[in-house]
Image (tube, grey):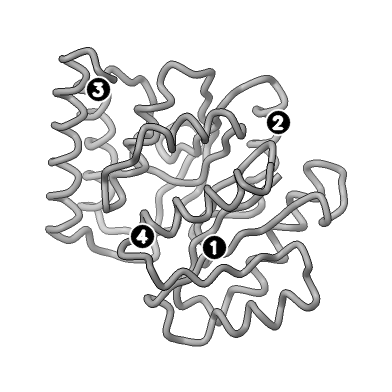
Amino acid sequence: MAIVCPMANESSTAENFITSVLQQCSSATGKNFETVKFFAVLDNFCTDGTYDLLKDLQKRLPELVAIWAPENKCVVDAYVRGYREALDAGCDWILEIDAGFSHQPSQIGQFFEKMAQGYDCVFGCRFCKGGKFTDAPLSRRIISKWGSVLANILLGTKLKDMTSGFEMFTNAALQQVLDKKIQSKGHFFQTEIKVYCRNMRIAEVPIHYRAPSQNVNAAVMMDAFRNLFRLFKERLAGNL
């Protein structure tokens, strides 16, 4: 299996986070680290030496793959690069998780439990029983909650949380998503992914998300609305 994790300026937490994730994966699978690959994707947004730190860490953790991707132009490029690395490596399950403990490694086990039941995708949910969304202003929580409601209405999806990350896919499911050609350049790409998975066997599990940034800027909102209505028109035209 693979972990895909874009990283930027994470020098203070990177080593602890990576080892915590690998330990949780090992506990969940009952297998050694060597059966897991951790793809950390870094680019020019990283300016604090995290990449050099990870290059050194690779000498002690051969399951860690530190990828330098200076061609990335946005956060979505980093995720997609990680996805492609995992698929090219032939990994059967791919877990996407954010760095810096905004997602909690201790919650990884429930993703494995659901995947073992035959699901194609398992999505982390902040708004179901047991889910939490902390360290964020009320405005951001409202945008995430009601953005999910609006997306479900317009796009025919039925998930409680359409805007979160922290998710797991089979190799085949993730390949189908990438074949659709993700167009969003902002965090709406998480919603876009969920739309492309809507006819697969999917499940949600509760997660605790600690917001690393407080604001959602205008460019992110414009990207979200533009792609939301693009997908809505594709749905009306029967092209989704």
Where is residue 74 shown, x and y percent of the image? 31, 62
Please report the residue visible at 28 percent of the width from the left and 48 percent of the height from the top: 141
| Residue 101: numbered disc | 1
**Mark 1 or mark 4, which is nearer to you?**
4
Is residue 180 shown above or below 94?
above
Number of residue marks = 4
Image position of 84 with respect to 48: above or below: above
The first of marks 4 and 3 along the sequence is: 4
Task: For marks 2 and 1, give the CA distance.
Answer: 21 Å
Q: Earlier in the sequence, mark 2 or mark 4?
A: 4
First in residue order: circle 1 vs circle 4: 4
At mark 4, the secondary structure is helix
Q: Is residue 100 left or right of residue 215?
A: right
Q: State yes or no: discs 2 and 1 in contact (Cβ < 8 Å).
A: no
Instruction: State the residue at coordinates (49%, 19%).
Output: 200
Label 1 is placed on what type of residue? Phe
Alpha-carbon neighbours of circle 3 within 10 Å: few (<14), some, or many (≥20)? many
Distance from the alpha carbon under mark 2 to that under mark 3: 28 Å
Mark 3 lies on a secondary structure that is: helix
Which residue is under mark 3? 155
Tag 2–tag 4 contact (CB < 8 Å): no
Looking at the image, is mark 1 or mark 3 earlier in the sequence? 1
* Pointer 2 with pointer 3, Cβ within 8 A: no
Task: Name the residue rendered at 43%, 38% in the picture.
Answer: 178
Which quadrant holds residue 17?
Answer: bottom right
Residue under numbered circle 4: 75
Q: Residues within 10 Å of mark 4 (few under 14, many from 20)?
A: some
Quick one: label 2 or label 3, which is nearer the N terminus? 2
Residue closer to the observer: 145 or 237:
237
Q: CA distance from mark 4 to mark 3?
A: 23 Å
Give the crowd class for mark 2: few <14, some 14-19, many >=20 residues within 10 Å. Answer: some
